[in-house]
Image (cartoon, grey):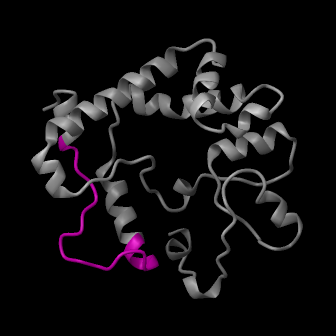
Amino acid sequence: MMLAKEGIPFESVRREATGEGPAPFELIGLGRIDAYIATSGTVQQLRLHAKRFVAWSVDTVAPAPAQVYISTRQALDDRPELFANFLLGVYDALGALTAARDLKPIIASMNQKYDIVERNSPDGGEATLAVAIDEYRPAYHDKFASNASDWKSASELMVRAGIVEAKEGLTFYTDAIRARAFDLK
């Protein structure tokens, strides 16, 4: 989408699968890739390891909502209460995370079910989790409010980038479940 926004033909660049995390950063040093899109957690890990790099938010070039929940329109119509309750559960979980002062028990709990790579860092992953929590504070504060114009821009860029086909009435955004969950009018 960033290429499309800047008018760079997708075919003029080579795409390489790199995986996520700080390891693909080493591919830049080896000359195998020129850049890659990473999560903010990866950026935090690279900072912790004192790597020299340039990073920017893709939203400064091609604004697009992140961390979205995807469903079919039919499912939303058939089970709106289920989705509203799910959103409230996510909201409650974010509330617990943003209120937490000691992150060690959270990381230990996560690591019981998932292999948390950051746990092997000198601080046990606390800095990376703290950055992630900070990034979710605005979403928690605003009860997941989203800007419809960002969705419109993102869908237009996806069409320009060839990710989706252009269709009449193409929309990727609804605030109906959020409004139901938080009793918004």
Magenta segment range? 158-176
Query: Does residue 3 sit above or below 113 in this rendering?
Result: below
Residue located 62% across and 16% down the image = 105
Taking depth in this image into account, of 126 and 47 the one nearest to the observer is 126
Residue 79 quadrant: top left
For residue 36, above or below residue 149:
below
Q: Indicate whether 34 appears above or below 7.
A: above
**Where is residue 89 shown, x and y percent of the image?**
33, 27
Residue 111 belongs to the span the image colors magenta = no
Image position, residue 5 (x, y; %): 50, 72
| Left or right: 76, with 39 as reference point | left
Q: Chief secondary structure of the magenta span?
A: loop
Relative horizontal placement of residue 81, taking residue 54 as reference (left or right): left
Picture coordinates of residue 154 (x, y %)? 39, 63
Indicate the quadrant where residue 115 lies. Answer: top right
Q: Report which quarter residue 8 is drawn in.
A: bottom right
Is 44 positioned to the left or the right of 64 in the image?
Answer: right
* Extreme residue in the top direction: 101
Q: Quadrant of the C terminus?
A: top left
Q: Is residue 168 magenta?
A: yes
| Total numbered badges shown on the rendered structure | 0
Q: Is residue 183 above or below residue 115?
A: above
**Residue 137 x, y percent position in the rendering:** 48, 28
* The one of 83 and 67 positioned closer to us in this rendering: 83
